[in-house]
Image: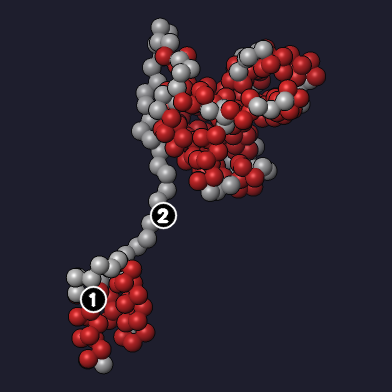
Amino acid sequence: MKNLISIMVVIYSVNSFALDMNKYKEKLRGHMDNFLGEETTSKILGEPEKVEVDLIQLPTIPKVESNAMDTSIYNKEGKVHHQGGKFDLLSNRDKQKYRIAFLEELYQVTRNAEAKEEDLAKFVNVLEQGGTREGVYRAVVLDEVYNTLERYKDAPSDKLVNYSLSFGAKYLGRKFNKESMMSLNLWTIKRIITGKTLDLVDVLAKNPEDLYSWYTVFSRELATEHQGLWRSKIRKSQNEKFHNKWVRQVPFQQIKSEIIIKIHKVMNYLNASKS
């Protein structure tokens, strides 16, 4: 037994071989565990190294300047604004199907109501004439119907308020006032949080890698913490590489529309629980 220990220690201490010593050490550890037990092995080789998952991290959240004279966010020359070319290759018929699907889901998550035929026709035409998904969204939440919803005296749930505060701190770099948040209703909170998120996304888009990382962490967290909420394979995936690949391939406006849908959907869900 003493000879075995001596041989193994000598072998382990030799560093002249061109080997991957970390891998060799783990193989050696396995053999020594069998003969000596884990406790004795750890005394000789030290504690085994912990393998940590290399997750994509949030970028530093930039400050969003509310300068009405700053037109840099309208600069469409960056990489993000030219990705997603596959959508442009679709037929007009297929493009229309995607646009209608977006509008139907948009109305469902923003107003909890079905889109009327005249609304679909109006906004499909807007999109076909070059309008943006973000522009359509802002029109929907700034019209008289949504304004009426915001006037309802309906206190938000604790879960919704806490999520909004947490989301603001983590993803927007903003500290919202809890008392002020509690004085609002679901509809106002959704509009404010989503609007500020879209403003941030424009700033993040100046450095595409920051935008990709932000979206990846955001989507991974929603898929993990609200597993039963999502139906589509894309949204329910907890694989960050999947989300990171997706966000690099689709048009910028589709990234924005996914963010819009996800925020509204999770906030609807959280507000349904009045706890």
Circle 2 packing at 10 Å, graded few (<14), some (14-19), many (20+), is few
Query: In percent of the image, x 19 and y 70: which residue is there?
Result: 16
Amino acid on which disc 2 is placed: Val
- Comparing 82 with 195, the one in front is 82
**Left or right: where 216 falls relative to 66:** right
* Mark 1 and mark 2: Cα distance apart in space: 27 Å
Which numbered marker is on residue 53? 2
Tell me the residue that label 1 is attached to. Answer: 12
First in sequence: mark 1 or mark 2?
1
Kind of element beneath mark 1: helix
Position of the N terminus, as image quadrant, is bottom left
Query: In percent of the image, x 37 and y 26: which residue is there?
Result: 62
221 to 267, vertically: above or below? below
> Which circle, 1 or 2, is nearer the viewer?
1
Q: Residue furthest top?
A: 69
Kind of element beneath mark 2: loop
Quadrant of residue 208 within the rendered picture: top left
Query: In percent of the image, x 66 and y 30: which residue is there?
Result: 109
